[in-house]
Image (cartoon, rainbow, N blue to C red):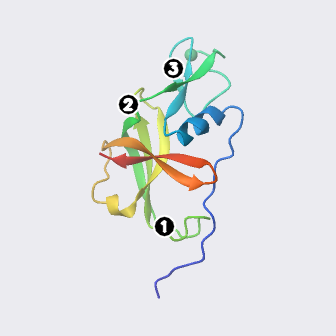
Amino acid sequence: MSGEVATTKKPVPAADELSRPFWDAAREGRLVIQRCSACGYYNHPPRNFCDACLARDLAFAPVSGRGAVFSFTVMHQRDVAGFENDAPFINIVVELAEQPMLLMVANLPIGERERVRIGAPVEVCFEDRGDGVVIPQFRII
Ligand SMILES: [Zn+2]
């Protein structure tokens, strides 16, 4: 038996007023992060006020899409809705180049298991999930 199990549709983000610019940019193949106009600090996920200085003057700014693997784990469980037949795969946390502790989460295919390590350089790529939903992901470079 291959262990193939019934799969469900992958979850998609529910964009809200705060996060909509992030998802709109992703649909255009651009990575943008909310940035404080007062102090320049990047906030992710987007907030109502800046984590660094509490200012409310926030806008989305393009970032390089470059970063490094901050942490990772191999996911073996096959009971996550939409990912039943993807397991095993690799969950990664990426620290973007623009700022220490500016973190995003993403997945890598299990084929990258030999290459993934803390500090591995990555760049953004975009996964089209259909119905106008595009997810920023990362690949090791
Ligand atoms: Zn600020």
Q: How far across and how far down the image is residue 135, in percent? A: 54, 47
For the residue pair 84 and 10, the one nearer the viewer reads as 10
Ligand 1 appears in which quadrant? top right
Question: Is disc 3 placed on a helix, strand or loop?
Answer: loop
Residue at disc 3, CB closer than 8 Å to ligand 1:
yes
Q: Earlier in the sequence, mark 3 or mark 2?
A: 3
| Three-letter residue code for mark 1 | Asp
Q: Find disc 2 in the rendering and name its residue.
A: 97
Q: How far across and how far down the image is residue 123, in percent? A: 37, 41
Q: Residue at x 46, y 84 (%)?
A: 2
Q: Earlier in the sequence, mark 1 or mark 3?
A: 3
Q: How far across and how far down the image is residue 32, in percent? A: 52, 31
Mark 2 nearby-residue class (10 Å; few <14, some 14–19, many ≥20): some
Quarter of the C terminus within the rendering: top left
Q: Find disc 1 in the rendering and name its residue.
A: 86
Q: Is residue 119 above or below residue 56?
A: below
Question: Is disc 2 placed on a helix, strand or loop?
Answer: loop
What is the residue that sits farthest to the bottom in this orientation?
Answer: 1
Q: Earlier in the sequence, mark 2 or mark 1?
A: 1
Distance Cα–Cα, label 2 vs label 1: 28 Å
For the residue pair 86 and 77, the one nearer the viewer reads as 86
Q: Find disc 3 in the rendering and name its residue.
A: 41
Q: Quadrant of residue 100?
A: top left
Q: How far across and how far down the image is residue 49, in percent? A: 65, 21
Q: Residue 34: in sight, yes or no? A: yes
Q: Residue 19: in sight, yes or no? A: no
